[in-house]
Image (cartoon, rainbow, N blue to C red):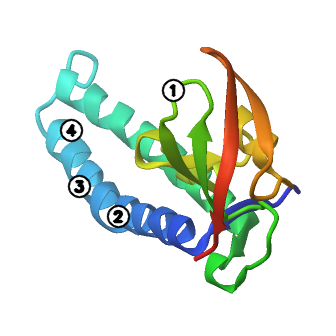
Amino acid sequence: MEKIPMTVQGYSVLEQELKQRQQVERPRIIQAISEARSHGDLSENAEYHAAKEAQSLNEGRIAELEDKLSRAEVIDVTKLSGSTIMFGATVTLIDEDTEEQKVYQIVGESEADVKSGRVSITSPTARALIGKKVGDTVEVNTPGGGKSYEILKIAFG
C-alpha cells in the first residue's frame, strides 16, 4: 500500500470534507431518498433517482477520502529545513524569459492548486525542482512548452 505524502493542512482539509460528507451530506441525502420514496411509483420518480445518484457519488467520495487518509504520510513542513528543495518547500523562482517571479509550495497531489501556488509533488515543475539549491537553473517541460527558471529562495514552514 503506497503512502501519500501531504502537509498537515492538506490532511486537515480532507478530514473536514470527510466529516462534512458523513455527518451532513449523508443524512440529508437519506432524508431526500425517504421523502422521494413517499411520493409513490419509484420507476418514474426523478427525485428518487437523483437522490440515489447523489448518494452513490457521496459514498464513493467518502470511500476515496477514507482511503487517502488511511494512506496519508503527514509531513509537518514547519519542522523541515535545509538548502535543497524537497516536499513541503516553498520555492521562489524567476522565469528566465519573462523575468516574472513565481512562488510555489510543493505539496501532495490531493492538495495541489496551481492558482494558489501549490504544485503537486508529481507535477513536472516539482519533479524538476526536487534536490536543487538556490542559484540553480532548472528546465521544466510543461504542457505549454519548455520553461527555464532560476531558483532565488527556498523556505519551509
The residue positioned 34% from the left and 56% from the top of the image is: 26
109 lies left or right of 30: right
Q: Which amino acid, by three-letter code, is at mark 3?
A: Arg
Name the disc covering residue 28, or none: 3
Name the disc covering residue 20, or none: 2
Disc 1 to disc 2, C-alpha distance: 43 Å
Chain-order first, disc 4 or disc 2: 2
The mark closer to the camera, 3 or 4, is: 3
The residue positioned 51% from the left and 71% from the top of the image is: 9
Disc 2 to disc 3, C-alpha distance: 11 Å
The mark closer to the camera, 3 or 1, is: 1
Chain-order first, disc 3 or disc 4: 3
The residue positioned 34% from the left and 68% from the top of the image is: 23
Q: Which amino acid, by three-letter code, is at mark 4?
A: Arg
25 lies left or right of 100: left
Name the disc covering residue 98, or none: 1
Disc 2 and disc 3 in contact, CB within 8 angstroms = no
The mark closer to the camera, 1 or 2, is: 1
The residue positioned 69% from the left and 85% from the top of the image is: 79
Q: Which amino acid, by three-letter code, is at mark 2?
A: Gln
Callout 1 crowding tier (Cα within 10 Å): few <14, some 14–19, many ≥20? few
Judged from the image, the secondary structure of the residue bearing numbered disc 2 is helix
Judged from the image, the secondary structure of the residue bearing numbered disc 1 is loop
Callout 3 crowding tier (Cα within 10 Å): few <14, some 14–19, many ≥20? some
Disc 4 to disc 1, C-alpha distance: 60 Å
Q: Position of residue 11 (x, y in %)?
A: 56, 68
Q: Position of residue 87 (x, y in %)?
A: 74, 61
Residue 102 vs residue 150, the one in the foreground: 150
